[in-house]
Structures are given as structure tokens and as C-alpha cells.
Image (cartoon, helix red, strand yellow):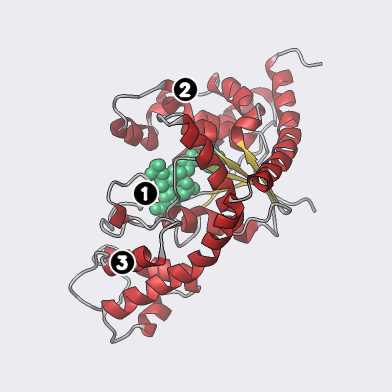
């Protein structure tokens, strides 16, 4: 039987957080044996906000290094750069002609980002989900592993695909979001009611994958909890502790009851130190490999060039079919 196809990506907007890792890459690593996986750096999506060109190039390479350091094997996964596969933008133009302004207007990410970047509400930001739909549909992806904030973009992708299929016959596979049961939304350490985000202003609110052991311990020590001093999962009334429990649970492969038992009768001090230990233990080997890879840009280039080639071969097949169906002349 043919393996199912997975596609996902992350924008090259800077250092990743523990939220990005637990919500996405950590799940990707588990999928590499069972599926045909395409993982890209969404560098074109990054252009929807203003970037320093040198830093964007640097961040793109860093993200490739991080994918590999976090456990994605370049022999088992197709790791590539979005802008190196022109079929994405070509399909995106066509899909734009099958997407309605009203649909795009409803996207919460567009609303959030427009508030954040009020001086630069460009049309790329508005049509961002259409390029994302093209990223996914051009590979006939079955599953798209993302954090919970990307759900709406998956829904619009499905709507666009269904609309096109009903006009021109079966063309696109209808993809599904794959959202992990735990870790889909890791919250800020200082603000446990909003998600941990790379672009958060307060450095104490987020754990970066590149943080030193000392910083990681300090940030967990200062994480906001409550006055009950008992390790109990209750998202509504104890969002801080519940978030720390989710982090610990994923890293240690334990459910909430097991964690409650483990820390019964012990205060937050002991628990927070254990969470910090688990995070340090997971991140240290990733950081070591990441730093080694960054010293070897030739190796990184070889990884993405191999991925780019395979991605182009696959994506061009479907693009050609779409061109033919909508009436463009294809050789
Ligand atoms: P920004 O702050 O620049 O908007 P971000 O931290 O939200 O960035 P993205 O690049 O938008 O990160 O997302 C990369 C991946 O990480 C996506 O799959 C997204 O769903 C996931 N993700 C982001 N934040 C979290 C979080 N707090 N918990 C779980 N998953 C997350
Ligand atoms: N929008 C996503 C990044 C992204 C993506 C994709 C994810 C771009 N294209 C295709 C999955 C599939 C984000 O902001 N995290």
C-alpha cells in the first residue's frame, strides 16, 4: 500500500519556542517512519512582514539545521525551501481566482497580524492562506501536522480544494489537519491564558529552543502559577500549573493523573524544577547537534538541494494537471 503524504512548514521568523517544538516538530519526528513526509521552510510566507534580508537568509538556514537537529532524518524526509519550488506560487495564483474575499476576511490570523503590523497590512498578508493551500494541495497531502492556531487555514484549504474539484473533477486530495491531543497550544509562562509565541515581547514568557540551561531554569522558576501549591490539572482555574503539566507530560510521556500522583504532597518548587530538568534534558542534545550543523553550511545546502529537487518533481506533476484543467496550454 502507498504511504500517506504529510506536508508542513514553519515561517523563518526567528528562534523557535518550546511551543513551536511541542506543537509541531516533535509530532513530525514521530511520523517519519510511517508517512512520506515533506517539510519546508515557509520563507515566502515570512515576507508578509518586514524582514532584514540577511537575517531572513540566516533564519532559513538555521531552521533547516533545527529540523535536522530535532530529529528529522534527511534520508527519510524531504526537507526543502518553499521559494525553491516555483509550483507553489504558480498554483497559488490560480487558487486565488477560486477564493473569495469574504472567506479571507474571516481569517483570525489576518485580523491578529493586521493589528500587530498596522503600518503594513499588505495584500500578501491577506492572501497568505491561499499560498498555504497551494503548499499543501500541490503535494496531494493527506495530513498536515500543525498547532491548533492553524486549524482555520486548513479549513479554507479544504474549501478551496472542494470548490475546484466540483468545477473540474477530482484534482486535489482533501487534506486533514493533524493536531496533537496535548501540546497543540502551549501557553506563555508569564501569561498562561495566551499562547507561547516567538514574537512575544517578554523574554520570560517564552522558552527558546536555543536558551541556555541557566535561562531555562530561571524562566520555569519564575513561571506564573497560583496560591494553591498543589499540582493538579485544571485548565480554567489553574492555567499556569496545567500548562507546566502539559509540557512535562509530553516530554515524559505521562498523563495528567500520573503527574498528579508523582507530585502529590510536594510544592510548586519541586515540580517546577522537575519540569525544567525535563526540558533541559530534551533540548541539550538538540542544541549540540544544531550548533554542529550551523558550522557546516555545505551540509545544510546539500540537505535542502536534495529536498528541493524531489519536491519540484512531485509538485510539477499536479501543477501541470491543474494548468490543463483550467485551460492553459500545456505541452
Ligand atoms: P509568531 O509569534 O511569529 O506568530 P508563532 O510562534 O505563532 O509565530 P508559527 O511560525 O506561526 O509560530 O508556527 C509554527 C508552528 O508552531 C505551527 O504549526 C503552529 O501551529 C505551532 N505553534 C506555534 N505556537 C504554538 C504554541 N504555543 N503551542 C503549540 N504549537 C504552536
Ligand atoms: N502558516 C503556517 C506556516 C505554513 C504552513 C504551510 C504550515 C505555511 N505553509 C503549509 C502547514 C502547511 C504558520 O504560520 N505556522
Instruction: State the SS at label 1.
Output: loop
Of badges 2 and 3, nearer the viewer stands 3
Q: CA distance from mark 3 to mark 1?
A: 18 Å
Residue 278 pos. (x, y %):
44, 72
**Where is 330 relative to 145, above or below?**
above
Does label 1 or label 2 sit earlier along the sequence?
2
Between circles 1 and 2, the one closer to the viewer is: 1
In the image, is residue 222 above or below residue 85? Answer: below
Location of residue 31 in the rendering, given as x and y in whole percent from the top left corner = 64, 58
Label 1 C-beta lies within 8 Å of the nearest ligand 1 atom: yes
User: Which quadrant of the view contains residue 61?
Assistant: top right
Instruction: Tell me the CA gap for discs 1 and 2.
Output: 29 Å
The C terminus sits in image quarter? top right
Circle 3 Cα neighbour tier, 10 Å, few/some/many (<14 / 14–19 / ≥20): some
164 versus 250 height, above or below? above
Residue 106 screen position, x and y as percent:
38, 31
Residue drawn at x 26%, y 62% is 236
The single residue placed furthest to the left in the displayed view is 227
> Front-most of 100 and 264?
264
Mark 3 lies on residue: 218
Query: Circle 1: is it few (<14), some (14-19), or many (20+) Cα within 10 Å?
Result: some
Comparing 195 with 1, the one in front is 195
Residue 106 vs residue 78, the one in the foreground: 78
Question: Residue under circle 1?
Answer: 197
The label number, if any, that marks residue 100 in the structure image? 2
Total label count? 3
Mark 2–mark 3 Cα distance, whole angstroms, equals 48 Å
Q: Earlier in the sequence, mark 3 or mark 1?
A: 1
Q: Secondary structure at mark 3?
A: helix
- Earlier along the polypeptide chain: callout 2 or callout 3? 2
Amino acid at each position: 500500500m502507498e504511504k500517506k503524504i504529510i506536508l508542513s512548514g514553519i515561517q523563518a521568523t526567528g528562534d523557535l519556542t518550546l511551543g513551536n517544538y511541542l506543537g509541531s516538530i516533535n509530532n513530525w519526528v514521530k511520523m517519519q517512519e510511517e508517512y512520506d513526509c515533506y517539510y519546508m521552510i515557509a520563507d515566502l510566507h515570512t515576507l508578509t512582514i518586514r524582514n532584514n534580508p540577511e537575517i531572513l537568509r540566516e533564519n532559513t538556514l538555521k531552521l533547516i539545521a533545527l529540523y535536522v537537529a530535532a530529529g528529522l532524518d534527511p534520508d527519510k524526509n524531504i526537507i526543502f525551501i518553499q521559494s525553491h519550488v516555483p509550483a507553489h506560487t504558480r498554483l497559488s495564483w490560480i487558487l486565488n481566482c477560486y477564493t473569495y474575499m469574504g472567506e479571507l476576511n474571516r481569517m483570525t490570523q489576518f485580523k491578529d497580524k493586521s493589528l500587530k503590523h498596522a503600518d503594513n497590512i499588505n495584500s500578501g498578508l491577506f492572501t497568505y492562506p491561499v499560498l498555504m493551500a497551494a503548499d499543501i494541495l500541490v503535494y496531494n497531502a493527506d495530513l498536515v501536522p500543525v498547532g491548533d492556531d492553524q486549524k482555520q487555514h486548513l479549513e479554507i484549504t479544504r474549501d478551496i480544494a472542494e470548490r475546484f474539484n466540483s468545477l473540474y473533477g477530482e484534482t486535489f486530495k482533501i487534506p486533514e489537519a493533524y493536531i496533537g491531543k496535548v501540546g497543540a497550544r502551549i501557553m506563555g509562562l508569564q501569561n498562561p491564558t495566551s499562547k507561547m509565541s516567538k514574537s512575544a515581547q517578554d523574554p520570560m514568557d517564552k522558552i527558546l529552543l536555543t536558551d541556555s540551561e541557566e535561562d531555562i531554569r530561571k524562566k520555569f522558576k519564575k513561571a506564573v502559577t497560583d496560591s494553591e501549591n498543589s499540582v493538579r490539572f485544571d485548565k480554567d482555574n489553574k492555567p499556569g500549573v496545567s500548562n507546566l503539566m502539559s509540557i512535562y507530560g509530553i516530554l515524559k510521556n505521562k498523563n495528567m493523573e500520573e503527574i498528579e500522583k508523582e507530585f502529590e504532597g510536594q510544592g510548586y518548587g519541586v515540580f517546577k524544577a522537575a519540569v525544567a530538568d525535563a526540558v533541559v534534558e530534551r533540548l541539550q542534545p538538540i542544541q549540540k547537534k544544531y550548533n554542529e550543523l550551523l558550522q557546516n553550511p555545505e551540509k545544510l545546502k546539500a540537505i535542502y538541494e536534495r529536498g528541493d529537487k524531489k519536491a519540484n518533481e512531485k509538485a510539477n506533476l499536479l501543477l501541470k494537471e491543474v494548468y490543463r484543467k483550467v485551460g492553459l496550454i500545456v505541452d
